[in-house]
Amino acid sequence: GPAPSRRRRHGCCVVDERTVLIYGGTNQGLADDALLDDEAENDYDDLSDVYVLNLAPTLAELCLLAVVRHRLDYSGRGVPKSLQAKLDALTQDSVTAF
């Protein structure tokens, strides 16, 4: 999915040796230099989002992501239903497949 937006005052939690959660915080949504501008201190929007970062994906996870990224047709081609369900989940918003 998309990468987290630039932010500050966010939370971060290490779940295990390969998973990190980034959540909340604030961002300004302006030019990159705006994050360093002290005069715009009150122009930040609160974020209420969560990102799950997989720092060490398995080969199977990388293959599933490649199928989604390249929009390959995985229906009816002998792909097991369990993998089809994971691929379906990867194409939906706000769903964790693994």
Image (tube, grey):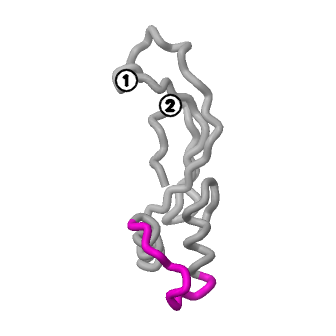
Q: Nearer the viewer, residue 31 or 87?
A: 87
Please tell me whether mark 2 or mark 1 is closer to you in this view: 1
Kind of residue sitting beneath label 1: Ala
Q: Is residue 50 magenta?
A: no
SS label for mark 2: loop
Image quarter of the C terminus: bottom right
Horizontal side of residue 25 vs 37, given as left or right:
right
Report how far apart the C-alphas of labels 2 and 1 lie in the structure.
15 Å
Callout 1: few (<14), some (14-19), or many (20+) C-alpha neighbours within 10 Å? few
Q: Residue at x 61, y 47 (%)?
A: 50
Residue marked by disc 1: 31
Q: Quick one: label 2 or label 1, which is nearer the N terminus? A: 2
Return the mark for residue 53.
none
Q: Is residue 57 visible?
A: no
Q: Is residue 45 visible?
A: yes
Kind of residue sitting beneath label 2: Arg
Q: Residue at x 44, y 62 (%)?
A: 55
Q: Residue at x 50, y 79 (%)?
A: 74
Q: Is residue 72 magenta?
A: yes
Q: Horizontal and vertical percent for residue 44?
A: 55, 21
- Secondary structure predominantly adopted by residues drawn in magenta: loop
Q: Which residues are magenta?
A: 70-82
Residue marked by disc 2: 8
Q: Is residue 5 above or below residue 94?
A: above
